[in-house]
Structures are given as C-alpha cells and as structure tokens.
C-alpha cells in the first residue's frame, strides 16, 4: 500500500492546484455523509444500491462503507463475512484484509 502520508499530501496538493480537476461534489458529499452515518444506515444504502446494480458502486466507496461499518460493529461475525466476501470480489489487492475479516468472524463464532 502506498504511503498514506504521501497520498494525503498529494490529495492536499491536488485540491489546491490551479486548473486541476477538483473532487466532484457527489464524491465529497458521499464521504462527508458516510463519515458520520450510523452503521445501519450505511448498510441499508450499500445493500440497496448493490441489489440494484452490483457493479455500479465504485470499489473505493464499497471498501470505505464496509470499513466504517466494521469499525462500528467489530463483533458482528455476519457483517465481517459480508465485508470479506465483497473484498474478495475485487482482489487480489485486498485479499489479505478479507482473510483477516474472515478469520476474525470465525474466531467470534467459536
């Protein structure tokens, strides 16, 4: 994974450069809203959108949504497995994280 500090600096620079593409309002609004949303609201939205068109939601947004929900519900084995399955769908970049989620779910169930 690239260095988070470097990526953060690149993000800052990209939003301040003249004539650079800005973050689309829809992306900014999504990130702001999901940051403070309740886990049940996040899951409801994600599940509804994925049921309509499984490939429509950008992978980065799916990863963020599931990550935020898993952080808020770390002891929900079913949720951890759901998040792991979603990560495996877009691997292998996130297979290691998916395996960790699956292992934690198994540990919680035993």
Image (cartoon, grey):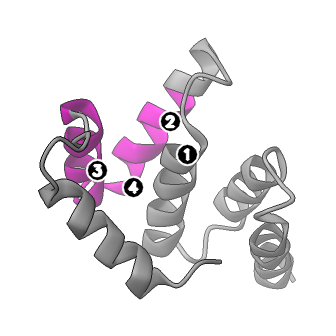
Q: Residue at x 79, y 79 (%)?
A: 100
- Secondary structure mainly formed by the magenta segment: helix
State which tag comes first along the sequence, 1 or 2. 2
Badge 4 is on which residue?
Answer: 39
Residue 96 part of the magenta-drawn span: no
State which tag comes first along the sequence, 2 or 4. 4
- Residue 49, percent from left and from top: 51, 23
Crowd around label 3: few <14 · some 14–19 · many ≥20 (10 Å): some
**Image height check: is 4 above or below 28?**
below
The one of 68 and 78 positioned closer to us in this rendering: 68
Task: Identify the mark at residue 107; answer none if there is no mark.
Answer: none
Q: Residue at x 82, y 44 (%)?
A: 89
Residue 106, quarter of picture = bottom right
Badge 2 is on which residue?
Answer: 46
State which tag comes first along the sequence, 3 or 2. 3
Residue 29, quarter of picture = top left
- Residue 4, percent from left and from top: 46, 82
Give the Cα separation between the discs numbered 1 and 2. 7 Å
Give the Cα separation between the discs numbered 3 and 4. 14 Å
Please identify, in this view, whether the residue under mark 3 or under mark 2 is nearer the observer: 3
Viewport quadrant of the N terminus: bottom right
**Label 1: element kind:** helix
**Label 2: element kind:** helix
The magenta segment is 25-48
**Label 3: element kind:** helix
**Label 4: element kind:** helix
Report whether 22 appears left or right of 52.
left
Residue 32 part of the magenta-drawn span: yes
Badge 3 is on which residue?
Answer: 31
- Residue 95, percent from left and from top: 84, 66
State which tag comes first along the sequence, 4 or 1. 4
Task: Identify the mark at residue 62; answer none if there is no mark.
Answer: 1
């Amino acid at each position: 994974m690239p260095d988070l500090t470097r990526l953060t600096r690149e993000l800052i620079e990209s939003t301040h450069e003249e004539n650079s593409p800005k973050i689309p309002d829809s992306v900014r609004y999504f990130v702001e809203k999901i940051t403070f949303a309740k886990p049940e609201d996040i899951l409801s939205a994600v599940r509804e959108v994925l049921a309509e068109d499984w490939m429509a939601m950008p992978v980065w947004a799916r990863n963020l949504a599931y990550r935020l929900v898993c952080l808020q519900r770390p002891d929900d084995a079913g949720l951890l497995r759901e998040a792991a399955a979603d990560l495996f769908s877009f691997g292998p970049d996130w297979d290691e994280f998916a395996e960790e989620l699956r292992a934690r779910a198994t540990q919680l169930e035993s």
